Structure formats: C-alpha cells, structure tokens
C-alpha cells in the first residue's frame, strides 16, 4: 500500500512538472519581443509630467493642523483587479472600491467565478477608517491585463489571453488554475508578447496609459480637499522587478497629481538604479510640481540583493559607487519592514553580524526560523521569492541600517538611510485590513479558513510555501502636521514615519544631549523634544555636542486606543554600529516596561490574561556609547501576547474539520504585535 501511494505521489508530481514545463515552452514560443532596455521607448517615458485636466485646483486648509504633529495611519501597498496577479486570482475590486473600503465602507471579497448566491462571500469592513492610502497596482502588465480582459481588440482572442482569463483551462487541479492564469503573463518576465502587444509593443503601452488614467481618477475622487481632511490618497504604482527569482520590488508614491504620462515598469528598465534615475530626471528634477519616492518591500525575499553594498559591486569605480549611493539616498528614503509575506526586520544567526539572539526576530517568518539554511555570505543568492536558496544579511532592514554606516566609511555616503513603514500588500483591495480576528486572506483564493490553513505545499523545482505562515500585514504611520498630501509627503521625505504589525500604536523617538527623565511627565514633552533634539528620521551630529555629553534618546508609545487592543509590554531600542574589524554589530536594549513576558492569552478562548501598560516613556543613555563611532538607533514597541489569526481560524472550525496546520507545533498560536520607529543616526562629524 505504501509503495502504491508513493507511486501515485511521484506520478502527480511528475504531471505537475511536465505541465509547467509544457506551459513554459508553449508561452515562450509566442515570441516575447520588447526587451527591457534595448527597446526603451522615448516616445512615452521621456515626456514631461502632467496634471490631468480632471483634477481639482487647490484645497482648503485643514482644521486638524498641529505643529507638534499628529499620528496618521494608512496603507501604501495595496492591489486591485488592475494588477495581473489579483485579477488572475479572480478578484474584481477596483481602485475606487479599495479607496472606499479604506474610508470605512464595506467590501465583498467577490471573485469573478462567483454565482448569484452571495451567502458564502465574506464581507469585510474596517472598524476605523484609514487616514491615507495609495493603490500600488503592478505596472508591469497594465497594458496586457487591460487588453486580455477587454474585447474588441486584436489581443483578446489570443490563446495567451484565453489562458489568462480562464477560458482555456490547463490540466491541473482547480486550486492551481489561478496560478496558471497568472503564469500566462508572468512567464514573459521582462519582455512583452507580440501576440498581445503587437510587433513594436505599442499596443500594450497605450493600453497601460488607460489603466494609469483610471488609477489617477480614483485617487482624485478619494482625496478630501475640504477642511475636514478626512482622507488623503496618493497616485502610486508598483515596480515589480525580479532577478533570478529574487525580489527587488518597489512602490512608487507621487507627492501630488502631477505625474509622468505612463509609469516605468521593470519591462522598460530592469535595474532599480535606472528607475531612480528616471524618477529623478522625469519627475523630481523636471521643473514641474512632480515629486516621488521609491519604497522597497519584501527584502526578506531578495536573496541578499535588496541591500547589497555598493562598495562590493564589481566592475564599477568609487565615483560610480558614490553616484549610485547618492541617487538611492535621494529617491529611496523609506523601507517597508513588514507585510503579508513576512517580517523583514531581522533574522538570527547571519554571517558577519555580531549580537546576541533576539527572540523577537523569529516574528512572522515565511521560512521557518529553525529551517536548515545556507548563508549567502558575501555573495548574492537566488530563489528567494520561491522560499529557496541561501539566507543573506543583506535581506534584512536591521543589518542594512548598520551596513549603511559601513558604506559611509568607505564611500562617504550612506545609501541605506531608511525610514520605516509597514503595509499589507493585500491583493483583494481591502486596504489596511489587519485585524487578526477578522482576517479573510490576502489573495481572494484564501478567503475560506480551510484555504488559509492549507499548510505546506511544494512544486518541485518551482516553489515551496505554507499559506499558514502568511499574515494580515501591517500599517504605515506618519507624524505630520495635517492629513494632506503636502504634509504627509514632507513627513515621508524627512522619515518621520513608523510601521506597525497592525495595531494603531503611537510610538515616538527623539535624540538630544540634555533630555531629563522628568520630560516624560511634562505636559509639553513633545514641544521640548523638538526644541532640544531631533525626531526619528533625523541625525544627531557630534559637532553640536557643546558640553561633551552622551546622547539621550527619548522614546514613548501609546497603545492602540481601541477597546480590545492588547496592552503594551515594553519599549526597546536597537543599536547598530561597525567595529574595528568591519563587523556589523547590533544590540537590543529593554528600556521601559517588563523585560520578560508577563502578559499572556488563553489560546483556547483568546481571552487575554495580562497586565501591561496603556503607555510607556523613557529617557535612555547608551551604556556602550563611543564618541568616535557612528551609530544607528531605532525603537521597537512590543505588545503583550495575543492570539494569532490562525488560532482564531482554527477555533472557528469544529475539531473534526481542523486541518493539520492547527496542530503544527511550528506555527505560533500567539503573536506579539509591535511597532517600529524610523531610526536616528549619531554621526561623529
């Protein structure tokens, strides 16, 4: 019986592999034609940015303006059916739907295949509207998706489009069909198909302009220009570059409604540096109102490529390394630290990183922390997007921040001076749907609990994964004077931002030379903090240290004010520096609250059994401070444990219907939600 079972399994695996190979070679035969750089089309991508004629002029002054700045929560990474993967999964939500959801309206997680019976379709709604959002659909197949889904054009009846729409089904299971539909377009990677785009690719680029127009119209409709300033929308898109199955994706956020006529995708330029140069030349320095930033995400999938140091790049001289570092510093001021595809803050046991074990680094990892892995060392890896290949220190935000100090030593410029945000990367249009006890998945295919709890899956030679290891994602936080595009964008530029794993925790971090512990009890704490120091995202310069003091960091946080939010457990400060042997050093300090976990939760009922704090504050001095060494510091705010979404899902199912994931000891039953502040850099100059 065992032998027969193994034979059937081997047959099924072989069938999947052969099917995938057949699909690959068939699609390749469809003649991919538009290369990533050779056919870069100046007719479209070198035009001046424009303000569309459908956008309004001006806006009223905001009633909520506050010089000490308000905390605003939002979403800077969300997808709708305009994205090729979202629509291949069957989603139908539009950018308008996503913006309405962000503002508090309900959203049905409806799929194209649904019939008239809507009783099984989950409806989600935020308990609190977001303050801001940006729809970041993948620009790569804007045109292809539009052509394949819109009849009366030459591409519509092509076999590739029929596979993409699901009109032609491949010989795989129903569960695999959406992935096959997505593969129909993704298989062309950075090229375009002549069958869809025409001989010169012109058809796809002009169709992409129509999709870009829809994105802009939705953003304009959502933007509250009244003095209420209830909601701010940003025109945006995602640049989704992959290299050897390693993730190099970025979200491009524009400051206002003056934007390029067509977004530059990885089909048009296959190097992030070329993307940044295009944004600089044809937006930031264009002599118009256009301004933009690039935000990398899922560095945990990048196989060490996202933060690979320019000092180690071969084939270029130091002047070019400096140019690239300066360009990145200008265009890429923020990084996304967490989303549905996992946490990118840190990982234990990385080569050339000195520091003790940080148990909180095991948080929401798609690759199980105890999984045997190979370290990439000083090389780039491959396969990160399929959760394969080596693990690299250059894939994590914490080590990148410290590596930036090392880059500054050798090149004089720090390319990794990142502020921090978080996001969802949800593909159903459910902007900011981050509650653990209300998670209905992030792709549409996982809207049922049994699908979310699907457990490990392996396609040999292609990918592996475990849907139970995904999570609802996080939120972006911004400290700004008011909820308007100019104010929020200025705050993003100066990096006065933070990320949370979902709760609306309000953290603040300042550094100065003479903060006293009593400042935490002062009614004008924030006024004093700004007057006598720098906020998160800033630099504390040694040359301003008149009395040769040690720097003092002021960190504070307020818990999420919603009724059922967990209490805060502790405040931490994480320090990074480079030692005299060139090694990256990191240390985690508990600075307020309880060093050990005191709160807990009953995982059979999800009722909290906790103490904890509504708010915490501390003035902290670095016990290992060295005036001569540059250093980087950021804050981490940790909640008491609470039930993870998978625990809620397992409890919702009868015991006899619970999948194996519910008894998998490597899947955490609890989660310690958290917030991360942007860093402050101490610079000895």
Image: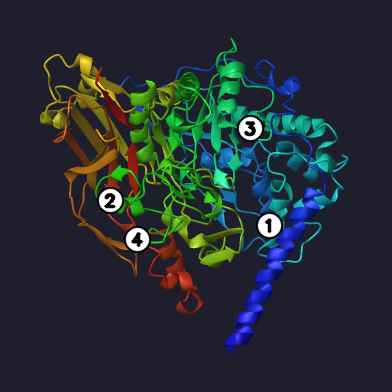
The x, y position of residue 542, in whole percent, is 21, 19
Q: State the residue at coordinates (50%, 21%).
A: 320
First-in-chain label (2 vs 4): 2
Q: Which residue is mark 1?
A: 178
The circle on residue 157 is none
Question: Tag 1, which secondary structure?
Answer: helix
Left or right placement of residue 419 versus residue 231 in this view: left
Q: Are marks 2 and 1 in contact (CB under 8 Å)?
A: no
Closer to the camera in the image, 375 or 69: 375
The x, y position of residue 253, in whole percent, is 54, 29
First-in-chain label (2 vs 1): 1
The circle on residue 670 is 4
Q: Confirm whether residue 271 shows in the render.
A: yes
Question: Tag 4, which secondary structure?
Answer: strand
Q: Residues within 10 Å of mark 3 (few under 14, many from 20)?
A: many
First-in-chain label (4 vs 3): 3
Q: State the residue at coordinates (53%, 62%).
A: 452
Instruction: Work out how far the residue at label 2 is from the one at label 1, CA to CA, in angstroms.
Output: 38 Å
The circle on residue 218 is 3
Q: Which residue is mark 2?
A: 358
Q: In the picture, residue 53 is in which quadrant?
A: top right
First-in-chain label (4 vs 1): 1
């Amino acid at each position: 019986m065992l032998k027969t079972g193994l034979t059937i399994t081997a047959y099924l695996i072989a069938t999947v592999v052969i099917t995938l190979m057949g699909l690959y070679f068939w699609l390749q035969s469809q003649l991919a034609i538009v290369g990533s750089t050779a056919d870069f089309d100046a007719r479209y991508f070198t035009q001046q940015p424009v303000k569309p004629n459908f956008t309004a002029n001006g806006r009223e002054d905001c009633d909520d303006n506050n010089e000490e700045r308000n905390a605003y929560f939002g979403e800077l990474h969300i997808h709708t059916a305009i994205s090729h993967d979202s629509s291949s999964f069957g989603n139908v939500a539009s950018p308008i739907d996503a913006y309405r959801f962000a503002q508090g309206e309900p959203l049905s997680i409806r799929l194209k295949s649904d019939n008239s019976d809507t009783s099984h379709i989950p409806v989600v709604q935020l308990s609190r509207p977001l303050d801001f959002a940006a729809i970041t659909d993948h620009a790569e197949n804007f045109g292809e998706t539009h052509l394949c889904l819109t009849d009366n054009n030459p591409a519509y009846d092509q076999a590739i489009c029929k596979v993409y729409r699901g009109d032609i089904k491949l010989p795989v299971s129903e569960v695999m069909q959406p992935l096959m539909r997505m593969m129909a377009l993704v298989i062309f990677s950075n090229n375009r198909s002549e069958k869809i785009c025409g001989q010169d690719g012109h058809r796809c680029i002009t169709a992409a302009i129509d999709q870009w127009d829809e994105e802009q119209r939705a953003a304009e409709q959502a933007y509250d220009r009244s003095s209420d300033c209830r909601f701010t929308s940003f025109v945006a898109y995602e640049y989704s570059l992959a290299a050897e199955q390693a993730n190099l994706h970025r979200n491009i956020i524009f400051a206002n409604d003056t934007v390029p006529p067509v977004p530059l995708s990885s089909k048009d330029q296959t190097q992030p540096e070329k993307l940044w140069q295009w944004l600089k030349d044809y937006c930031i320095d264009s002599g118009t109102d256009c301004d933009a930033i690039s935000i990398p995400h899922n560095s945990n999938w990048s196989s060490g490529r996202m933060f690979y140091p320019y000092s180690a790049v071969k084939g270029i001289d130091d002047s070019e390394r400096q140019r690239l570092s300066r360009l990145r510093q200008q265009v890429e001021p923020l990084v996304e630290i967490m989303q549905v595809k996992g946490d990118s803050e840190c990982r234990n046991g990385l080569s050339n990183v000195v520091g003790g074990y940080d148990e909180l680094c095991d948080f929401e990892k798609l690759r199980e922390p105890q999984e045997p892995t190979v370290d990439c060392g000083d090389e780039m890896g491959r396969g990160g997007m399929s959760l394969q290949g080596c693990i690299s220190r250059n894939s994590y935000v914490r080590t990148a921040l410290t590596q930036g100090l090392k880059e500054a030593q050798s090149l004089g410029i720090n390319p990794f001076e990142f502020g921090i945000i978080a996001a969802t990367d949800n593909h159903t249009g459910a902007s900011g749907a981050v509650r653990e006890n209300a998670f209905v998945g992030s792709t549409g295919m996982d809207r049922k609990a049994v699908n979310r709890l699907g457990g490990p899956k392996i396609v040999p030679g292609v990918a592996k994964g475990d849907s139970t290891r995904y999570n609802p994602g996080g939120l972006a936080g911004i400290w700004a004077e008011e909820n308007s595009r100019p104010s929020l964008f200025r705050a993003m530029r100066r990096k006065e931002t933070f990320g949370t794993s979902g709760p609306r925790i309000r953290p603040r971090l300042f550094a100065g030379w003479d903060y006293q512990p009593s400042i935490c009890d002062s009614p004008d704490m924030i006024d004093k903090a700004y007057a006598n120091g720098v906020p998160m995202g800033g630099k504390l310069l040694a040359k301003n240290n008149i009395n040769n003091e040690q720097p003092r960091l002021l960190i504070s946080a307020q818990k999420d004010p919603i009724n059922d939010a967990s209490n805060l457990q502790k405040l931490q400060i994480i320090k990074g520096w480079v030692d005299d042997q060139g090694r990256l050093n990191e240390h985690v300090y508990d600075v307020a609250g309880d060093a050990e976990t005191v709160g807990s939760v009953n995982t059979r009922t999800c009722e909290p059994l906790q103490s904890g704090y509504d708010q915490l504050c501390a003035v902290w001095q670095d016990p290992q401070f060295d005036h001569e060494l540059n250093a980087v510091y950021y804050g981490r705010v940790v909640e008491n444990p609470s039930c993870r979404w998978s625990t809620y899902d397992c409890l919702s199912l009868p015991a006899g219907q619970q999948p194996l994931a519910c008894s998998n000891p490597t899947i955490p039953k609890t989660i310690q939600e958290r917030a991360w502040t942007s860093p402050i850099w101490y610079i000895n100059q």
